[in-house]
Amino acid sequence: MKRSARYLCLLLLFALPVVAQEAVAAKPSQSPEASMSPSGEEIWADLMLGNKRFMAGESQHTDLVPLRQKLVQGQHPKVIVLACSDSRVAPEILFDKSLGDLFVVRAAGNIADAIGVGSIEYAVEHLGSSVLVVLGHEKCGAVTAACSEEKMPTPNLQAIVDKINPAVLRAKPHSKPEDLVDTAIRENVHQSAQDIMRTSAVLREALQSGKLTVVEAVYKLASGEVVRLDKLSLIVPAFKLDVGDVMRAP
Ligand SMILES: [Zn+2]
């Protein structure tokens, strides 16, 4: 065998196992980390179990002192919740979760402004959160104010209503006057989810790559139930990634 041919054989002998190993490592199903991490839908199913406990008056998570001590080391919340500031809509309570479980961003009308979106980016990029729940609720005062079309008494209150108004305008042609607030509440949840994706390249990329799951939902005050919006009627279907639409949105 010529020297060049022997060299080629040796090269193949050493190179092939490396190529084979890389091919195995590239398969996501073989990664132990991937197989251990729950999917976005599994995490949502766990939140729904917590919500059922809350509805039934069987909430857990009362042993807070040792948990508080454990969390001094750091936080790794799997879930981000964008919710309204309304005192009746406390995410940790209605999902029966505890310290360290939820990264919560709250503003009247569950609106997504730059600071809210930045907070969500921080949780996804630095804390490893992989599910974002955009949560509206029945009888939302901020959405009701937007539906009233009245001028707000301060510029800051007007800023909240201005952010919700496009959702009200979309809801109007599809709703009887007596149903307008309920329809606008659902549409406003959808609008917040769209606003987040429209204004954050980081979160769009996380959604496209499967690193982030977005769930839109509405909380019912009397029953305590959190209902995912794809189970309710929406003017625009519940959130689906369409980067073209997101980029074209005003
Ligand atoms: Zn509200």
Image (tube, helix red, strand yellow):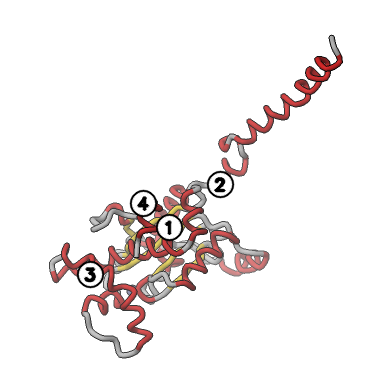
Question: Would you say the beta carbon of the disc 2 residue lies within 8 angstroms of ligand 1?
Answer: no
Q: Rounded to the nearest whole Å, what is the CA distance between mark 3 and mark 2?
A: 41 Å
Q: Where 79 falls versus 25 (above or below)?
A: below
Q: Between disc 4 and disc 3, whose residue precedes? A: 3
**Which residue is located at x 64 percent, y 64 percent?**
74
* Residue type, label 1: Gly
Q: Rounded to the nearest whole Å, what is the CA distance between mark 3 and mark 1?
A: 35 Å
Instruction: From the image, tell me which residue sits under label 3.
Output: 169
Q: Rounded to the nearest whole Å, what is the CA distance between mark 4 and mark 3?
A: 21 Å
Would you say 226 lies left or right of 200 here?
left
**Which residue is located at x 67 percent, y 27 percent?**
20
Q: Between disc 3 and disc 2, whose residue precedes? A: 2
Question: Mark 3, residues whose alpha carbon is within 10 Å: few (<14), some, or many (≥20)?
Answer: some
Where on the picture, by quarter, is residue 111?
A: bottom left
Question: Mark 2, residues whose alpha carbon is within 10 Å: few (<14), some, or many (≥20)?
Answer: few
Q: Rounded to the nearest whole Å, what is the CA distance between mark 4 and mark 1?
A: 25 Å
Q: Between disc 1 and disc 2, whose residue precedes? A: 2
Instruction: From the image, tell me which residue sits under label 2.
Output: 37
